[in-house]
Image: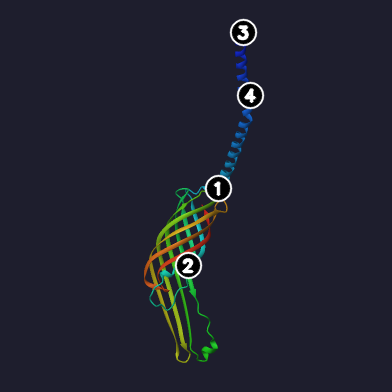
Amino acid sequence: MLNIQQRNKHLLIGFLMFTCFTGFFNSLPAQDYEWEISRLEKQRLARMEGKDSTWKHLKGHFELGLSYGQAFLAEAAKSQEPEPYILPSRMGAWRFHLNWFPKERLGTDFSIGILTSRDEPPTPNFSSVLGGEEFEAEGSGAGYIPIELGVKYFILKRKFRPYVKVSGGIIIANSRYILVEGNIVDGISRSDSQSRASSWMTGVHSGFNYRLGDRVNLGCELSYSYSGAYGEVLGGYSRFEALGIQTGLSFIF
């Protein structure tokens, strides 16, 4: 009887050992599969890291750029006072900027812009003028120079980098109006008026940078700018308020 119990005990132990070894070896292919997936994923991430390594590191670097776009002046900024001429609501805008990045996602932005508009009079009919007919010609032009310092925050740290920015500074405005009228018999008169003013300004901006190479960025920015009152009317506007859009290239060094 004792021999039978011992034999059953040995059979049970053998069965359990067989089951454990069988389960262990059966699990090896699954573990190998999981390990292979993990290895491939690590390789993929390493390739992405290597690909993005040249895009990511802005900390401690400068960025120099030039952009061009359009500024659309707000109707709300127009003066209620009568003016001999009104600036067009759209102006061409150049902007030079220098950025420095103390952090990977954070940058300071110093910029100087030039916004210009010019309305040249049509060429008069000289035969009519020499014949004594009355004529009138008027021309106007204006320019704005915004000088701003801003803080830029990048939302992503990849090749495509959207960002938000706030800025503040001053804007210098200049306008000129010329009127020539009369006839060759009674005489021709010319009136020339010029105005200059400056004020504080602030702005909010949103845009993105897209890295074209190791050190070259393509950028696009949408901005809203607002200034205090000029103290006098320039081209029909009592202050600067505009929505702008610009695209440009920059170089990281």
- Identify which amino acid the numbered label 3 is placed on: Asn
Q: Is residue 237 left or right of residue 69?
A: left
Residue 91 point in image, percent of width and height: 49, 69
Disc 3: CA contacts within 10 A as few (<14), some (14-19) or many (>=20): few
Residue 229: quadrant of the picture: bottom left
Which residue carries the number 3 mark?
Answer: 3
Q: Which mark is residue 22?
A: 4
* Foreground tag (1 vs 2): 2
- Identify which amino acid the numbered label 1 is placed on: Thr
Q: Is residue 157 above or below residue 189?
A: above
Compute the Cα span from label 3 to label 2: 103 Å
Residue 122 point in image, percent of width and height: 52, 80
Q: Secondary structure at mark 4?
A: helix
* Foreground tag (4 vs 1): 4
* Foreground tag (4 vs 3): 3
Which residue carries the number 2 mark?
Answer: 72
Q: Is residue 158 left or right of residue 195?
A: right
Compute the Cα span from label 2 to label 4: 77 Å
Which residue carries the number 1 mark?
Answer: 54
Frontmost residue, 178 versus 4: 4
* Badge 4 or badge 1: first in the primary sequence: 4
* Badge 2 or badge 4: first in the primary sequence: 4
Tag 1 and tag 3, C-beta contact below 8 Å = no
Image quadrant where one finds the N terminus? top right
Residue that appears at 51% across and 55% down: 208
Q: Is residue 124 above or below residue 75?
A: below
Compute the Cα span from label 1 to label 2: 37 Å
Q: Secondary structure at mark 3?
A: helix
Residue 209 point in image, percent of width and height: 52, 55
* Foreground tag (3 vs 2): 3
